[in-house]
Image: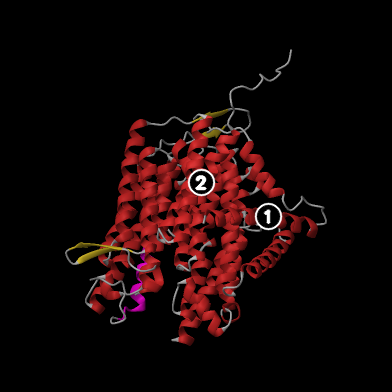
Amino acid sequence: MIEYLLFATFIGLLFHGIHRKVIARVQGRPGPPIWQEILHALKFSFKETWIPKTASRALFVGIVFVAIAIWSGALFILLTGGSILLLFAIYLLHKIVEHGMGLSTGSPYTKFGAIRSVISAASELPLLVTVVAIYFFTGSLSIAEITAYQEMNGPLLIVAFPAAVAMYLVILSKMHYGPFSIIEAKEIVSGNMTEHFGVWRAALEVAYALKTYVLLYAFVLIFIGALPLWLTLILMLLLLISLSFVCAVTPMLSPYDTVTIQSLVTGALVIYIVILAVVMG
Amino acid sequence: MFNLPTPHIGGPELFVLEFGDIVAYFSPYTALLFAFAVLFTVLVIVSRPERQVDIAFGGDAYYTKEVDPDLLRFQRFMAIACGLATLGAMVTGDVFNFTLFASMIGITNIGIVAAYRNRHVLNAAFQYGIVAMLATVPLFGGAAIILSSTGTLSMWELFGGAVAVPLIAKAFLVLGVMGEGMAPFYIAKAEITRAQGAPFILMVHVSSLLLFLRVMEIVISM
Amino acid sequence: MKKRTALIVGLAAGVIAAAASLSAALGYLPVLAAELVAVVAFPVFVIFIALWWSAKSGEEDIPFIGY
């Protein structure tokens, strides 16, 4: 199990590197080598580390452990075919990690990051809509039964296309350098990660790598189905590259525009759910 | 003796705690939420608040705010009360108890920031309080509609296929919980975050997110 | 925290996680329990190993701080 976690961390960091490379090439820059993010995580882990004097010590350190633990848990939920409601829960708990990271330091920059994370609460509602839409089709929220349903009836990507779009938006809103990544915007230094340096930052890189792996894997598993590992990895890579194209050609939105777009998408999907409920009884 | 009727939603039941006819239960889903609430309650108990740094604009000066020990004690007490209410809401097997815990979370959330002497924070807490109070009407109304239309409030009965819960009751429950601090009604919360005491302020978010997750499980299962 | 303590805690967490996954593979432990152990031990492993190799040994040269 720990070997799978290490594998997922490695692949997730590699994906982050590919993400940066693709963005750079789309924008006509050479870009860093694709293993740059792995080097980054290692570099941070070798730096001198302490806890800022103004920080709330227990929360400052504890939140880093929680960040890694929840996404390792999410990976195991996917592997054992648990409930996607659990996955949704972990996605929401990640929000708490973002708040906690930003508020625990006392720095105004991290606090701005945390407050932006509070106001972009609309980013998780599309995921909830996805969960409900899938329940309408499969009658179950267990991943094992969802993949079984897809073997019988074909991929949900075709049957429940709007739900897939919602999940795509959810993944996009958590990508680095994306249109919705206002909580780590450069005008507030690094947002809520500003004060987590050295080992803490390296551990957060590990947690974010696991998060990217889990979200991409979940998309493939829920909307395309259970496939051999190599094919899953290729599909995850294709999904990531499509996300990188979106990130490369869109500017970062202002916080209020972010909330507006996410709320509009959620509203559209709620209408979709109501139509589904009427059509399918 | 007990069989949770909805293993395909939150997983099979792991452990059951009987209080007379009120039966609390742990499924993998509620156990995860419970563990998370315990974790953050422990963090509230052991951690001290951060010292916020303020920058004086137009110069190089910055200073850290002082921590008032009396305020700290009161915030910590309220945050622990909020954590306990969240724990109750996570595992209860009764819709009325759930609504009671939900409204208690709303009260303690205001309590966490009420002692903080800052006009913006108190304004935000006041507005949050009004929304939370308004939200108790659909919250308890939803529970009342469930009781009057099905004759029971026990989740063990409601989750089974035998009773049909009206859609309006489900919508009311979700609306009530959203009013305690979820997406469209969270406006006041951004200002609440100004207050000092990160572990305690964080409890405001932890409790409302966990409450929302729990009500989703209840509503989908019914 | 001493450099040595960080190494001991990190290695212990790694060994516990590896032992849990091995005993789950051999059938001595339920898979759910092994996963719980891995979820708790993995962050400890990552952070303490990093704290170990980023910590100073206390025998470095004093850096040149100018005339």
Q: Residue furthest top?
A: C67
Mark drawn on residue A62: none
User: Does residue A91 appear left or right of residue A30 in this picture?
Assistant: left
In x, y percent, where is residue C54?
60, 34
Picture quadrant where residue B55 is located: top right
In x, y percent, where is residue B221?
36, 73
What distance separates the C-alpha of mark 2 from that of mark 1?
A: 23 Å
Q: Is residue A142 visible?
A: yes
Question: What chain does badge 1 belong to?
Answer: A
In x, y percent, where is residue B150?
25, 78
Q: Is residue B171 visible?
A: no
Is residue A235 highlighted in magenta? no
Q: Which residue is mark 1?
A: A14
Q: Which residue is mark 2?
A: C14
Q: Residue furthest front?
A: C26
Q: Which residue is rendered at x = 57% and y = 62% of the image?
A: A215
Secondary structure type for disc 1 = helix
* Amino acid bearing label 1: Leu
Give the magenta-colored segment's residue range: B164-177
